[in-house]
Image (spheres, rainbow, N blue to C red):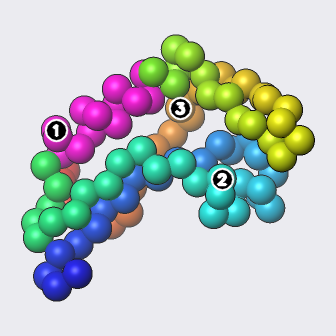
Amino acid sequence: MGGKSLWPVQATILEFPPPIRDHVSAVMVFGAWLGGSHPNRELLWNSIVDQIKYLYKNGIILKLNDNTKIKFNIRVQFITFDLPALAHN
């Protein structure tokens, strides 16, 4: 990427058991920043907060391989950050 860094913002559903929760297909990407500098916190987080509010209000529907649909109500229990994100505090 030549001097650029990627800052992904990802989430998983904790109620899934670890073999499923830890699988790459269970990771939801809420946003990403690609650039030569740290992301603009307001620009990055405003969109993500809006997405989380939408999911909180409407839930999320997952479609299984047999076409069965399961609706989950979304509640944020906690948020973790990697070490580069601490530079923004």
Picture quadrant where residue 48 is located? top left
Q: Position of residue 34 (x, y in %)?
A: 22, 63
Residue lying farthest top? 57
Q: Mark 1 is on which residue type?
A: Glu
Q: What residue is disc 2 on?
A: 26
Q: Is residue 51 magenta?
A: yes
Q: What residue is disc 1 on?
A: 42
Q: What residue is disc 3 on?
A: 76
Prevailing SS of the magenta stretch? helix
Magenta span: 41-53
Q: Is residue 47 magenta?
A: yes
Q: Residues within 10 Å of mark 3 (few under 14, many from 20)?
A: few
Q: Earlier in the sequence, mark 3 or mark 1?
A: 1
Residue lying farthest bottom? 2
Q: Residues within 10 Å of mark 2 (few under 14, many from 20)?
A: some
Between 82 and 69, the residue placed more toward the observer is 69
Q: Mark 2 is on which residue type?
A: Ala
Horizontal side, residue 77 vs residue 4: left or right: right
